[in-house]
Image (cartoon, coloured by chain):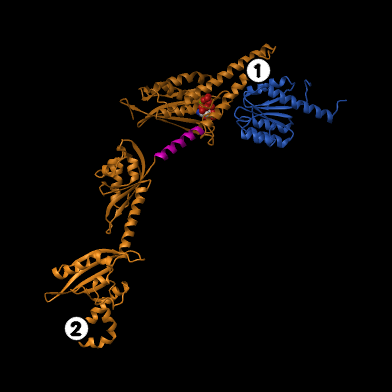
Amino acid sequence: MIRNGAPVRVLIVDDEPDICWALTHILKSTGIVPVTTTSGREALRLAKSQRFHLAFIDAKLPDLDGLDLARRIREGDAAARIVLVSGYFYCDDAEVRQAMVAGLIADFVGKPILHQQVEAIAREVLSQVVSTSRVIAPVP
Amino acid sequence: MREIHRRAPRRAGEAADSEAGRYKTLYSMLLDASPSSVLLIDSQMRVVSANRNFVEKALRSEANTVGQRIDAVFPPAIVQQMDLVSRVRAAFEHNRPTRGERMTYRSPGLATRTYYYSLIPFSWKGAIEHVMLLLEDVTEQVRLGEEARRAERHLASVVESASDIVLSTMVDGTILTWNAAAERISGLTLGEVETRTFFDLCAEPHRADARRGFETAKRGKGFGVAEWDLVTKSGALVPVSWVGSTMKDDRARVVAIVAVGRDLTERRKFEAHLLQSQKLAALGVLAGGVAHEIRNPLSIASSAAQFLSEEPEDPEFRRECRAKILTGIERASRIIENLLHFARPGEQPNMVQVDLVRVVRDAAALAAAQAGTQQVEMNIELPGNPVLVSGVPGLLQQVFINLFLNALGAMPGGGLLRTALDRAGAEVRVQISDTGDGIRASEIERIFDPFYTTRPVGQGTGLGLSICHSIVRQHFGAIDVESVEGQGSTFTVRLPLLKNGIRQ
Ligand SMILES: Nc1ncnc2c1ncn2[C@@H]1O[C@H](COP(=O)(O)OP(=O)(O)OP(=O)(O)O)[C@@H](O)[C@H]1O
Ligand SMILES: [Mg+2]
């Protein structure tokens, strides 16, 4: 397991600061230190300045629609894995299913958040990123 | 006649010689032209002459007609039905005519025909010389008459079987006709309504209007469309949509008023369902908002609990988790509390006589502490005497507290909060103005929506104004807003005044 300085960059966007707090603490066990913001526009700006492997996006942001934000992030970086987080939708809502089928989002996490689900997603991304970075840049 | 006619060409010259001959020719021509059958019968019951129509219609030759006895000329069935022999005899013996009798006859293989006949004695110089038999085939007329009657019956049955009420009244509104639908819907028979007026049958609150409608109708154009409830036999009310028109005679005088009424019971039920489903849809939107609002604090509390269940070593983090659980639960329950207020706008609260001046003053006092910490100056202009309204003091106070808190929220850097209360006609007006951020014109429509908030998360539920709105509505009042972005907002609450304990 990669500890500090893990090459996996994660973005968390939720207008509720305590949700950002919770997600940050959940990811701690995987060694990931995420970037958090409560604003959709700020998230967009961050995504333009750096690439994120994984982004947790709240579906209902006051300034931007969550799925819209996901679309715009992926326009800049098609490899970004997006997780929609929502207390409004259910995982089998038509809008959510469509976004999954279209490949816009990779996962859906409902509120209240189950920590295990978030951890599993993070570990999966972690293993992918680590294995591909080994292939591309093998450690001497 | 037939006989004469045949010889006519030959006798035309002779006839011209004598006046009698001339008339004979003329009359025989007239008779032959007649579409009726005309026979002359002598006292021996013999046919003296028969016109062309008879010979043709009876399919006889003149040879076996003229000079024959009538019971040989007519089929036995006719002779018997007409009682021909005794009628002719009566004509001869008593100078008694038979007029306008009706007879039907069906010759073998042909359709039944209907005849009118008359037997008229012809006397000359005191003696009855002949009896004239006039026979007219009226089959066609009878058929037409029957058709007309059938059409009439058909129309009547259209009216009778219509599912809508079709009724007619005299000009004064007295019921004339009343179809089956009217009977079915009202439970009243024509006999029961015949002497009553239409307005009598309308529900009391609609009676005057119906009477006016008929007054208008009387003047010519009907009363258009109107909704007047009908009182049934059992006293129940049936909502009916009426269309009124007038019936005019040849001289364009209104002789009757025709009203067609549709029972709206089913439609009303449908409308109620629609309203209900719209309410449910609105509730769905509300529920969606609630889900979002409540799941955030729940999720935070849940996360904190999940962290604690892993028994973290850091005492500071454990303390943080416990605090998050408590605030999360508090927030969730505050939302529910607000919702409960919001969900009960229909409930009729126990209203009492309330001094609005006092309510506003108390609410302002509660807001004053907060105002002080924000450098907001409070300027309150209240009348010295009580201003009475009917209401629930606690709820009214909530309205003003919410408005004050919103105003203070809009002035984080200080400002002026002005409150004025004045009477305007039958209502009292409370204006709360701030010099805060103001509201963008595009957002002003939304501020009364539940869950609409621009406050940072966790600080506003967005229910404050929707609660104010529903409370004010409950008190038969209104709440409005005027705002200029960057300059401030004014919220105005209007409530009906109580005068001598009576709502104005
Ligand atoms: N006096 C005001 N000046 C400017 N904006 C206002 C004012 N009053 C209300 N608003 C706007 O209307 C929104 C809705 O107000 P409302 O009272 O319904 O909810 P809230 O104040 O946000 O939340 P809560 O009342 O639950 O604390 C506010 O968030 C704010 O944007
Ligand atoms: Mg408020």
Question: Which residue is drawn at the image coordinates 54% and 25% (left, top)?
Answer: B461
The verdict on residue B149 being magenta is no
* Left or right of residue B122, residue B367 in this image: right
Q: In the figure, residue B115 lies in which quadrant?
A: bottom left
- In the picture, the disc for residue A125 is none
The verdict on residue B275 being magenta is yes
Residue B406, image x and y in percent? 51, 26
According to the rendering, which colour does chain B have?
orange
Which amino acid, mark 2?
Answer: Ala
Element at label 2: helix
Per the rendered image, the range of residues in magenta is: B265-281
Residue A20, image x and y in percent? 66, 23
- Tell which of A21 and B229 is nearer to you: B229
- Tell which of B422 and B164 is nearer to you: B164
* Left or right of residue B103, residue B483 in this image: right
According to the rendering, which colour does chain A have?
blue
Which amino acid, mark 1?
Answer: Gln
Count every numbered label the image shows and give the total.
Answer: 2
User: Where is mark 1, residue-wise?
Assistant: B306
The secondary structure that most of the magenta stretch takes on is: helix
Residue B247 higher or lower than B312, as above or below:
below
Q: Nearer the observer, disc 2 or disc 1?
A: 2
Residue B321, image x and y in percent? 64, 16
User: Where is mark 2, residue-wise?
Assistant: B20
